Amino acid sequence: MAFNPRKFKKILIANRGEIACRIIWTCKEMGIKTVAVHSDVDRDSLHVRFADEAACIGPAPSAQSYLNIPAIISTAEIFNVDAIHPGYGFLAESAYFAEICDACNIKFIGPPARVIRLMGDKIEARRVMHEAGLPIVPGSPDAVTSEEEGIKLAREIGYPVIVKASAGGGGRGMRIVRSEQELGKALETASTEAAAAFNDGSVYIEKYIERPRHIEIQVLADEFGECIHLGERECSIQRRHQKLMEEAPSTVLTPEMRKTMGDAAVAACKKLGYSSAGTCEFLLDVNGNFYFMEMNTRIQVEHPVTEMVTLADIVRNQIRIAEGEPLGYTQDDLLIVGHAIECRINAENPETFAPSPGTITAFNLPGGPGVRVDTFVYSGYQVTPFYDSMIAKVIVHARTRELAIARMKRALEAMVIEGIKTTVPLHLKIMDDPRFRAGDIGTDFMEYFLAKNGKKAAAQ
Amino acid sequence: MSADKEETGSRRARNAQRPAPSVNMEELRELIGLLRENGLAELELENEGFRVRLRRESAASEPASHGAAPPPAPAPAAHAPAPTPAHPGTHLGTQATTAAAQDQDLHIIPSPIVGTFYRSPSPTADPFVKIGSNVGPESVVCIIEAMKLMNEIQAEATGEVVKIYVENGQPVEYGQPLFGIRS
């Protein structure tokens, strides 16, 4: 056993899937032991296989396993861990969980509970970040409580407007409204959806930006007030507000704009007292105006594209920062080399997007220069219907965007997954789309793409 | 924990054959074979300043000396075989689950939560149940401690306790077999 001079000797990973494996890989490189937790249907998952220790914490439903705080803390105590990494989703943005970890003397690898709570309330987050200097989309500062109030506000802002859930995320509780007649019904349905999804029916209204790009800035901050950004990620290719593909750098950001947006995000995070890795999400309009949307106080699915172009290991930095180490980098150390693209491979029908659970009968991973695959499945693995449909991420890195697209194409062609349907064919088609190849993308891209391909199919 | 004791026994044996005082791998294998073939629960051998003790959880389970089996070579992720029993590290519950899998005629009481298993309400008290105890659905059979809370576990079945798969004070996972009941 190699001597490990680190503060953390053992970390529990309160997650599953590819991100649990991703965290284990870095822990292994750092000489830190890992504890996996899993539900009874995830017993054969790779994160269970590759962790040093593992325990089953509950049945398949997340509420009784991956969201089961007493079971996770109990496991942490049994294995005597120093820290818990929450990954993304599940408990990653639960301020309550972070507080319990603190109370149990287990370090939560993420920002302080206070900051998680503040950024979790989307209305408060916008107000606070606006005060901290980030531009925001014109809209109601507070939840809209009546239709009259909504109408008055929408007239001030000007149509189109968008109705959003205060506690929202993942596209639920959102409605685009183009005229006053539609507003009443939109407020009602968005509120009902929000109540069902988040147990909180409050909604707010803001200006709807046509054809915006979704650009986000990755930040890293230590516990001593130092903060830097790692540039942007372009995440405009989304379907129903769920990202499908991400790239870095963006084709439209000039070095000046990168500096402006990055510096603004860093300044706001410093004011907030942020620490650990985090992401400020912005909408970028066609005139180059950017508006703060929300902050994700955790590692993100698409973090590998930033890792590829900056050579940073974001998980490693999260752990180092949680150990109390100073950041050790300044903004001048930031390096952005080449271009990276990530495709999310989901167990879904590539045309209807219907989930496709089942047993993977054959599995081949692409390799070769500049290809990275983050996954937790293998040949013989049974994809269950209980969790997120994402089974792998294919990430490529090359000198230019054009080369990265070519590299992604050949990687996807070599990616063989049999027994279930996946979104690999969809990504292959996107790689060939002239608008995508030209970098002419916005959050409306998939709408255009699916309409175009639907028409083609009908014409054939 | 007596699970520790077993490990210590086998680990001592394993360490002993590196600078090799008086036992070799071949002899150890033979001993393990003897243990298994004769359905023995425990075997102790002493020889010129060297002692090895091998113990098995139950006649049906794997040999207690997991240390003796070489860990499976880490395969590349893509080609990893179905990993079920070959967890290279510690997986709570594997041993008891393997043992209980042989007892298909018994009603198994599984642990409803992850925590620490206690057979009695306090260290000095008598155990809730022993082999041969008769239980009803509401009989308390053990305590599982999780986050400093003592959770009393009920049998939820009627019959005689014929197997106890875990040792007092041992950590258990969700779904891990605790008792075997014959109704």
Image (cartoon, rainbow, N blue to C red):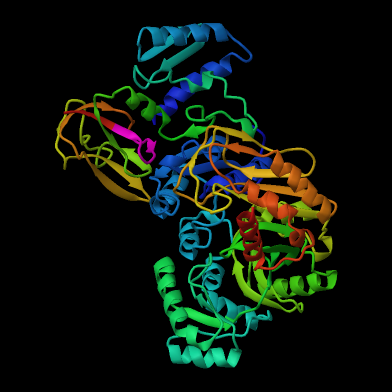
Q: Is residue A61 above or below residue B70?
A: below
Counting from the top left corner in percent of width and height, residue A235 is at 67, 63
Range of residues picked out in magenta:
B169-178
Of residues A153 and A219, the one nearer the viewer is A153
Counting from the top left corner in percent of width and height, residue A413 is at 71, 41
Horizontal arrangement in the rendering, residue A94 relative to residue A443 (left or right): left
For the question of whether residue A154 can be seen, the reply is yes
Q: Is residue B172 above or below residue A138?
A: above
Q: Quadrant of the N terminus of chain A?
A: top right
Counting from the top left corner in percent of width and height, residue A21 is at 59, 43
Magenta highlight on residue A205: no
Residue found at the very far front of the displayed protein: A459
For the question of whether residue B23 can be seen, the reply is no
Residue at x 81% of width, y 55% of height? A401
Of residues B53 and B76, the one nearer the viewer is B76
Residue at x 52% of width, y 42% of height? A35
Q: Main secondary structure of the magenta part?
A: loop
Q: Is residue A201 above or below residue A245?
A: below
Magenta highlight on residue B171: yes
Q: Where, by quadrant of the figure, is residue A3 drawn?
A: top right
Counting from the top left corner in percent of width and height, residue A360 is at 54, 36
Q: Where, by quadrant of the figure, is residue B76 drawn?
A: top right
Q: Is residue A249 above or below residue A23?
A: below
Of residues A134 and A382, the one nearer the viewer is A382
Horizontal arrangement in the rendering, residue A97 relative to residue B117 (left or right): right
Total labels: the figure holds 0
